[in-house]
Amino acid sequence: MASVDTRAIEDEIDRIRSLGLEELRREWRRLNHGEPPRISRDLLVLALGYRLQEIAHGGLGKSTRRKLQTMAKALRTTGRVGPAPSLSLKPGARLVREWGGRTHTVTITENGFEYAGTSYLSLTKIAKKITGAHWSGPRFFALPAAGAERPSHGGRDG
């Protein structure tokens, strides 16, 4: 990688800090070949400082650009960037489901779940044991989707 003259970059950033708004916009057009965004003078100074360093150091790597594009797409589609928060079940909590004329109770443990005297690592395995068919365990036990608001019972249950 070529040597970067950090002193020259710092001097250029100092010069940019001293510019007025119209001069900053001209700098933006020179460095970015397009119209500057409608942002405050302070943000424009920061953006230009970043752009100077990007030019000198080569910018972001391919994997970082790809990850940012993926995050931007997720934000546009789902309104969130990170993974959905998971449902938190505390040890000792009980899940109750009626099925086949019987009441089935699962207790949350430190290491998973307990049902009918047996430990399980997943609710899905318990749902299959109860029904004999493949079910999503959380769906079978009517748990809200991760990140979904819990329904308010408002006037329904008083």
Image (cartoon, rainbow, N blue to C red):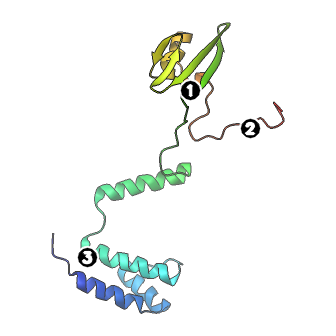
Label whose residue precedes the other's in the sequence (1 or 2) = 1
Q: Residue beneath label 3, please?
A: 56
Going by the numbered disc 1, the residue's amino acid type is Pro
Residue 136 seen in the figure: no
157 sits left or right of 140 in the view = right
Going by the numbered disc 3, the residue's amino acid type is Ala
Task: Check disc 1 and report its element: helix, strand or loop.
Answer: helix
Q: Are marks 2 and 3 in contact (CB under 8 Å)?
A: no
Label whose residue precedes the other's in the sequence (2 or 3) = 3
1 sits left or right of 21 in the view = left
What distance separates the C-alpha of mark 1 from that of mark 3?
A: 51 Å
Q: Vertically, is 102 above or below 112? A: above
Quarter assignment of residue 4: bottom left
Q: Vertically, is 45 above or below 105? A: below
Q: Is the residue marked by circle 2 packed among few (<14), some (14-19), or many (20+) residues within 10 Å?
A: few
Residue drawn at x 65%, y 41% as measured from the top left:
149
What distance separates the C-alpha of mark 2 from that of mark 3?
A: 55 Å
Q: Quadrant of the C terminus?
A: top right
Instruction: Return the x and y of residue 153 as percentages of the image width and height.
Output: 77, 35
Q: Are marks 1 and 3 in contact (CB under 8 Å)?
A: no
Which residue is at the front of the view, 133 or 6?
Answer: 6
Q: Residue beneath label 1, please?
A: 138
Q: Vertically, is 84 above or below 76? A: above
